[in-house]
Amino acid sequence: MNALDDFTNALAACPLIAILRGLRPGEAVPIGEALVASGWKLIEVPLNSPEPLESIAALARAQPDALVGAGTVLTARQVQEVHEAGGRLVVAPNFNAAVVREAVALGMVCLPGVFTATEAFAALDAGATGLKLFPSEMIPPAAVKALRAVLPRDALLLPVGGITTANMAAYRVAGASGFGIGSALYRSGLAPAEVKRNALDFMAACAGTIRA
């Protein structure tokens, strides 16, 4: 299948994107194993992490059934570098039409960051796969509901920033399609077992259940 089909299937199974900011190449494989074992299939390594392309390449090789890529992608050249490393997912904190177009041309999933309805419509027009609502600390569930009312019904809305197991339900009710989870899931140096515990807690919260 292509990246878009894999993304659609992964989002249906677990609508959570792991944001591994600060990940080092030596941690990549065990952290990836912990996430995939917990049911996560979407993994992002921000490009301001140490040697991010090495980590992306290692994750892509070790977890071929996951959709691996980069975050904090700011230029079309960076999109190309992520693609060359084996990444199939491009996430950005902002909307840059050149980044979206390059990702689409390379058959990659692209989730640009947007804050306003104007940015959201422009990103979708450029070919974005979905929209990263960022920072979600400044986009409460009421704002997500308002965006959902005017955007195309099938537009994917993924709040990122400050998402916790406690506030996920309110965002889901408002119309969020999924979430990007960062420091509440992974911080540099965190042991794979701890990451797995965090991952399972988020899975349970997303499913509306409570783990014993």
Image (cartoon, rainbow, N blue to C red):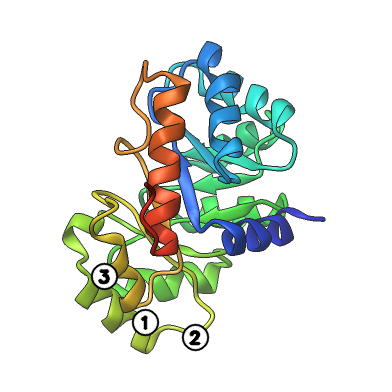
For label 1, count other residues whose C-alpha is less than 10 Å away and answer few (under 14), some (14-19) or many (20+).
Answer: some
Determine whether 174 is above or below 14 in the image: below
Which residue is the site of mark 3? Answer: 170
> Does the image show residue 48?
no
**What's under tag 1, amino acid-wise?**
Arg
Q: Nearer the viewer, residue 82 or 140?
A: 140
Q: Which percent across, then down, holds residue 177?
A: 45, 68
Kindly check if marks 1 and 2 are in contact, taking CB atoms under 8 A apart as contact: no
- Distance of label 3 from label 1 (alpha carbons): 14 Å
Q: Residue at x 51, y 39 (%)?
A: 44
Image quarter hosting the N terminus: bottom right
Kindly check if marks 2 and 3 are in contact, taking CB atoms under 8 A apart as contact: no
Number of the label disc, if any, that sits on residue 148: 1
For label 2, count other residues whose C-alpha is less than 10 Å away and answer few (under 14), some (14-19) or many (20+).
Answer: few
Number of the label disc, if any, that sits on residue 153: 2
Q: Which percent across, then down, holds residue 73?
A: 47, 40
What secondary structure is found at the residue carrying circle 3?
Answer: helix
**What's under tag 3, amino acid-wise?**
Ala
Q: Residue at x 37, y 77 (%)?
A: 175
Left-right relation of 59 to 114: right
Sequence order check, earlier mark of 1 and 2: 1
Number of the label disc, if any, that sits on residue 137: none
- Distance of label 1 from label 2 (alpha carbons): 7 Å
Say which of marks 3 and 1 sits in front.
3
